[in-house]
Image: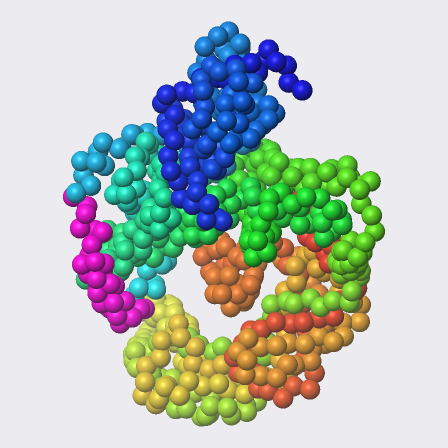
Amino acid sequence: MFNNQEQQILPTLREDVKLLEAAPAEDGSKQWMLFDPIPNKYFTIGIDTFELINYWQNGMPVDEFINFLASKDYEIDEEGIMTFVNFLKGNSLVKNIDEKDTARLIEQKKKSKQNMFKWLIHNYLFIKFPIVKPDKWLERNLGKVSFFYSKMWTNIVLILGVIGILMVIRQWDEFSSTFMYLFSKEGMIFYFISLIFVKSLHELGHAFTAKKYGCTVPSMGVAFLVMFPVLYTDNTNAYALKSKYKRLRIVLAGMKVEIYLAIIATFLWSFLPDGPLKSIAFIIATTSWITSLLVNVSPFLRFDGYYALSDWTNTKNLQPRSFATARWFIRKYLLGLDEDEPETLSKSKRKFFVIYAILTWIYRFFLFLGIAILVYYFAFKVLGIVLFLVEILWFILIPVYKELKIWWEKREKVSWNKRNKISFSVFIFILVLLFYPWSSTVSMPAVIEANKTTLLYSPRPGKIETINVSNGQLVKQGDILLVLKSEQLDLSISMLKEELETLNNDLKMIASNTKNLENRFIIEEKILEKDIELSGLEKVKKELIIKAPNDGEVNFKNRFKIGQWVNPNEPIFHIYDAKTSNVISYIEDYNIKYLNDDYKNAKFIANNGLMDSLNVRLKSISNVSLTNLEYPELSSLYNGSIAVRQDAQEKEKLITETAYFKITGEILDNKYDFKTRIDGELYLETNSSSFMYRVFNIVYNVIIEESGF
């Protein structure tokens, strides 16, 4: 029982607290809201609470009030009255008229205070800073934007969108190639300018739509999402609207603005001249609204998508209610606990809550894991490690620990039944899948290339005089493939020969005259120089006779014809031995330990889908891990699976982000001629290992790689 002295008098309700009629509850019953204007908070109440407030008598003794309610056919006991009184006091909805009330407020304030560490943990993911109170400005300017809510404006945008899309299709190569511009310094500057512009209009879309339906907009400002600034609009007063469709329009207004902007920007991009405006139009038409929609449309975070789903399903407090129902469901069907359901729900509503909660937990797990990795890499190393651990411990491990702790506390209530026997069997089955050392296969990016392959170039510019081979012809080492002619080289040789002939005649004329001995030595020296120069030019002329460096098949570009000039930087012939092709593959360093000693059952599957799988026998594995990738087609720059970056000094040099071992193999029973390199995947049977063992090794390798300071 309660102390009669403490519950003798009913507290006095504050006059500024408003009672508003709200939208019907999920079961169709009437609802009301208590609105506290000071913190701008709403409290939903049902018919019983509404009648209790309607009959409320400030300052009346509790016993008298109970009798008064009985005369009105409203039955309630003292405990029910005090529960409601505690709710009013706990949310500061009553007047403070004596020292006890003041002491209670001080105690509430102390309990609500968090130490700095807890505050940072709870708020560094998302914290708001209000900047402006825009309500009066929105009121004055609402008429100026009324056109944007008309059907005519919608039709104009749709027409522009159709035209813009058709124009982009015609200029698709130019449009798609512009994406690379975003990775430049100038592109990043324009991206952030565009993002600020788009986000500002996004929030104004929320604000003007809320104002259109009669809501006040108390504040707009900047919020920090994982330390990244984003704009926000306080639309709390939209809760007062009875129509869920109006609330939905307010929630979706921001995304609607961004989609309209993207459509208009696509249209403008097609007609704007090259320059900053066209770049900004491209950014708005593509990346800015796509990235914002990916965040805003998600129903698993408390952004636009969450509130839209909440209004659409007419479900208030969607996440806490779903989480409570899902925890009850899991305890019931996993542990077999027969506990009361947190609230009475229809079968379809309960199913929706459970599915939504589980999807949200999965989404949050990967989100928080991603954020942890993000802050680790973007902060300096010590801070990155601290934030990573905080993210993993506080947002993933501690909630799991708390739930398991509750399970442990309720262990005495658990008894074997059909539900938990099935759950236990499924759990054991999952553990077996995770920890049993199954025989597994490693997939490795690979290429096939001819064993002996040579590209032949012209040593200098020249004109084709004769072609002695055709495409696909087999040749032997030393066979003459093509003869080039350089008229400039021939002219130089001819002039040198004439000079030598003249010098030799001069030498004969003075050979018998002893007085011209000094001139004789000069002429002989010139003859020697010209002979050396002629020998060099004739050597170059011999190089214009292109010969096969090895046996093989010729891959000759048929566009080269007799009389055509050849560029020294462009290959003329490709000679290869297609029947003895090699398979070159790359395996991550943490997978190398799983390879079998006998290297059997390796198969190569080409990415082009035009070849049968090929049996491969591995011949060698590099003794040390490599960081340079020789084959660009396997790199992430060319849609390959190996993550690389370009070397700062040598752009053509590709550096892998993690270490790889190079594996060389040979094809067994080859039935194809590989005239060019073929990329694909090499699948290799490995030593038996469990999934969790592999995960542990990957994590362990990452920790070792990142442990250096």
Q: How many numbered discs, if any?
A: 0
Dividing the picture into quadrants, the one containing residue 661 is bottom right
Picture quadrant of residue 478: bottom right
Viewer-nearest residue: 3 or 516: 3
- The answer to whether 705 is drawn above or below residue 606 in the figure is above
| Front position in the image: 356 or 245 | 245
Residue sitting at x 31%, y 35%: 217
Q: Where is residue 656 shown, x and y percent of the image? A: 56, 56
Residue visible at 62% across and 36% down?
A: 394
Residue 156: image quadrant is bottom left
Whether the magenta-drawn stretch holds residue 684 is answered as: no
Q: Return the x and y of residue 399 as percentages of the image width and height.
A: 65, 39
Q: Specify whether residue 197 is in view.
A: no
In the image, residue 553 lies at what x, y percent?
54, 87
- In the orientation shown, which residue stands out farthest toward the top? 99
- Identify which residue, 60 or 684, lies in the foreground: 60
Question: x and y percent of residue 440 in the render?
Answer: 74, 67
- Span shown in magenta: 144-173
